[in-house]
């Protein structure tokens, strides 16, 4: 009887440990902060505060001291020593591609600014591109990036690129941005921009 009791206790302990292990594995999430030198990846990540500040400063320097910019809207980092920095408010936008060299210094590779004052307000479940541009990324590779706006109900934005990867965009303050290797600006088929709500449902789509 004692032997059976001990066996049952041991089995119960093993099952409990196994269950706990399963729960833990399901709850583990990847680190939020990565090294910008990692290879390009389709899902963005956060930067440490020092790297983020240096990237934003490099973009700001491209525009020029004393120039009035809209508020910082979204920063897209996903490896390749490359960061997209975007400013936006209403119809006013400005963005830069900045690249970090081997010494750790950021340089601006390209930038643009624009205004869409006649554009209607963004809908609750709408995603809308503000433009797609070609640029140079880390290592001198050709790349493409897009910046746009997303409605309040949009919790995630994914880009579907014909003949290319599916890319999760960075999303903050109602703005999204993403970059990926390759020149897709002049492709005959446009990319599709999908917006998802907090439950993961596709609720908006645009080009």
Image: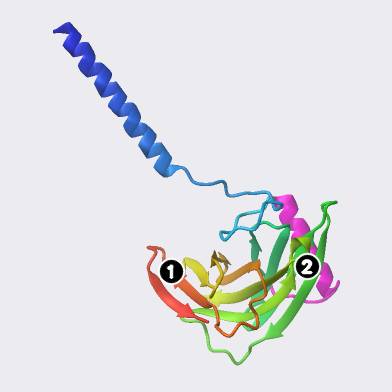
Q: Assess disc 1: are there few (<14), some (14-19) or many (≥20) residues with their C-alpha within 10 Å of its C-alpha.
A: many
| Residue sticking out furthest to the bottom | 118
Residue 81 in picture, x, y percent from top left: 73, 57
Q: How many marks?
A: 2
- Using the rendered image of the protein, determine whether residue 152 is visible from the camera's viewpoint: no
The reply, left or right, for residue 169 in relation to residue 152 is right
Q: Mark 2 near mark 1, Cβ–Cβ under 8 Å?
A: no
- Secondary element under disc 1, as helix, strand or loop, is strand
- Please give the residue where the numbered disc 1 appears in the rendered image: 196
Q: Judge whether residue 38 can be spotted in this image.
A: yes
Q: Is residue 87 above or below residue 75?
A: below
Quick one: 16 or 62, which is closer to the camera? 16
* Residues shaded magenta: 49-70
Q: Quadrant of residue 148?
A: bottom right
* SS of the residue under disc 2: helix
User: Furthest-top residue in view?
Assistant: 2
> Was residue 55 drawn as part of the magenta stretch in this picture?
yes
| Residue found 58% across the figure and 85% down from its top | 188
Q: CA distance from mark 2 to mark 1?
A: 30 Å
Closer to the chain start, of discs 2 and 1, is 2
Q: Position of residue 139 (x, y in %)?
A: 77, 60
Which residue was labeled with disc 2? 59
Is 49 located above or below residue 83 in the figure?
above
x then y, percent, for residue 91: 63, 84
User: Which residue is at 57% across, 68% downward?
Assistant: 173
Q: In the figure, is residue 103 to the left or right of 24?
A: right
**Above-or-below relation of 11 to 84:** above
Q: Give yes or no for residue 195 being in the magenta stretch.
A: no
Q: Is residue 17 above or below residue 176?
A: above
> What secondary structure is the magenta-colored segment mainly?
helix
Q: Residues within 10 Å of mark 2 (few under 14, many from 20)?
A: many
User: Image point 46% across, 78% down: which residue?
Assistant: 205
């Amino acid at each position: 009887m004692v032997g059976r009791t001990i066996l049952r206790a041991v089995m119960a302990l093993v099952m409990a440990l196994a269950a706990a292990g399963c729960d833990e594995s399901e709850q583990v999430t990847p680190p939020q902060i990565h090294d910008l030198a990692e290879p390009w990846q389709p899902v963005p990540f956060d930067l440490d505060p020092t790297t983020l500040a240096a990237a934003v400063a490099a973009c700001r320097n491209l525009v020029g001291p004393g120039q009035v910019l809209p508020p910082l809207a979204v920063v897209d980092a996903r490896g390749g020593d490359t960061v997209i920095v975007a400013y936006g408010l209403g119809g006013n936008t400005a963005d830069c591609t900045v690249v970090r060299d081997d010494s750790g210094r950021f340089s601006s590779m390209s930038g643009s600014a624009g205004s869409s004052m006649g554009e209607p307000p963004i809908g609750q479940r709408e995603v809308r591109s503000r433009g797609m541009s070609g640029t140079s990324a880390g290592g001198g590779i050709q790349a493409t990036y897009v910046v746009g706006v997303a409605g309040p109900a949009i919790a995630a934005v994914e880009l579907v690129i014909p003949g290319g990867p599916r890319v999760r965009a960075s999303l903050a303050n109602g703005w999204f941005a993403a970059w990926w290797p390759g020149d897709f600006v002049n492709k005959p088929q446009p990319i599709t921009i999908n917006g998802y709500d907090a439950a993961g449902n596709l609720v908006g789509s645009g080009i």
